[in-house]
Image (spheres, grey):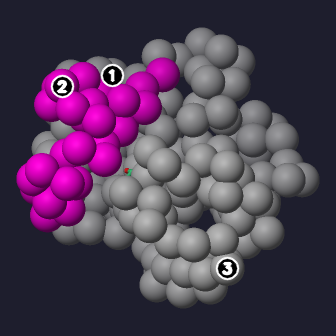
């Protein structure tokens, strides 16, 4: 079984990915972390030095390699992964896609604390962060909502939803 965790930055994909991988005894991969390792550069440096377009190609390529090289896993995707190319269809074809639909307020609180490592929000001030999240989430919902399973993170036990 291949499980793809998708959702906005700060939605808890990495946290839940670790939990699920332990409970379901599946290997865990974090797509951003694999890209950082392959490129030997932080995500911020990749964006700054090579640009977002390069990052999106790399993201697609690394995800496809993981899918081809492994029979089963939990993959925590980047917030933008399902929104570029035909990635969401590719994921649905190869496994189960789970969207962590975390509330704007929770995303805001988390991103206020963890902005530096995320190039898309690094330069956004505290006052603008909420409207950025609302706008970007609005643009991305058409991709996220194609998931096979939708989890309201604050209330749900992902494990029971996957059974
Ligand atoms: C991005 C989310 C990030 C990372 C990159 C772009 C996005 O991953 O892939 O900064 O477009 O939403 P996280 O969702 O793990 O922060």
Residue with the mark numbered 1: 71
Tell me: is circle 3 under 8 Å from ligand 1. no
**Magenta highlight: main SS:** helix
Residue 64 in view in this figure:
no
The nearer-to-camera label among 2 and 1 is 2
Crowding around mark 1 (Cα neighbors within 10 Å: few <14, some 14 to 19, many 20+) is: few
Give the mark nearer the N terminus: 1 vs 3: 1
Q: What element carries label 2?
A: loop
**Is residue 80 placed above or below 160 in the rendered structure?**
below
Q: For the C terminus, which image quadrant?
A: top right
Indicate which disc, 2 or 3, sits on the residue closer to the N terminus: 2
Label 3: which residue? 127
Quarter residue 150 falls in: bottom right
Q: Where is residue 120 in the image (x, y as percent from the top left)?
A: 40, 64
Quadrant housing residue 87: bottom left
Q: For residue 79: magenta? A: no
Is residue 97 positioned above or below 86 on the image? above
For the residue labelled by badge 1, is the local secondary structure a helix, a strand or a loop? loop
Residue with the mark numbered 2: 40
Please name the residue shown 29% across and 36% down the image: 42
Q: Give, as a single range, the part of the protein colored magenta.
A: 28-54
Element type where label 3 sits in the image: helix
Disc 3 residue crowd, few under 14, some 14–19, many 20+, Cα 10 Å? few
């Amino acid at each position: 079984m291949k499980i793809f965790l998708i959702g906005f930055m700060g939605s808890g994909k990495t946290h839940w990915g670790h939990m699920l991988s332990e409970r379901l005894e599946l290997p865990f991969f974090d797509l951003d972390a694999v890209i950082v390792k392959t490129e030997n550069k932080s995500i911020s440096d990749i964006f700054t030095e090579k640009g977002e377009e390069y990052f999106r190609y790399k993201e697609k390529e690394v995800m496809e390699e993981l899918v081809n090289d492994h029979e089963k896993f939990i993959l925590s995707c980047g917030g933008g992964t399902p929104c570029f190319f035909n990635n969401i269809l590719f994921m649905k074809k190869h496994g189960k896609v789970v969207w962590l639909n975390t509330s704007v307020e929770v995303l805001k609180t988390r991103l206020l604390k963890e902005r530096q490592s995320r190039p898309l929000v690094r330069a956004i001030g505290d006052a603008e962060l909420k409207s950025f999240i609302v706008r970007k989430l609005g643009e991305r919902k058409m991709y996220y909502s194609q998931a096979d399973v939708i989890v309201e993170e604050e209330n749900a036990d992902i494990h029971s939803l996957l059974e």
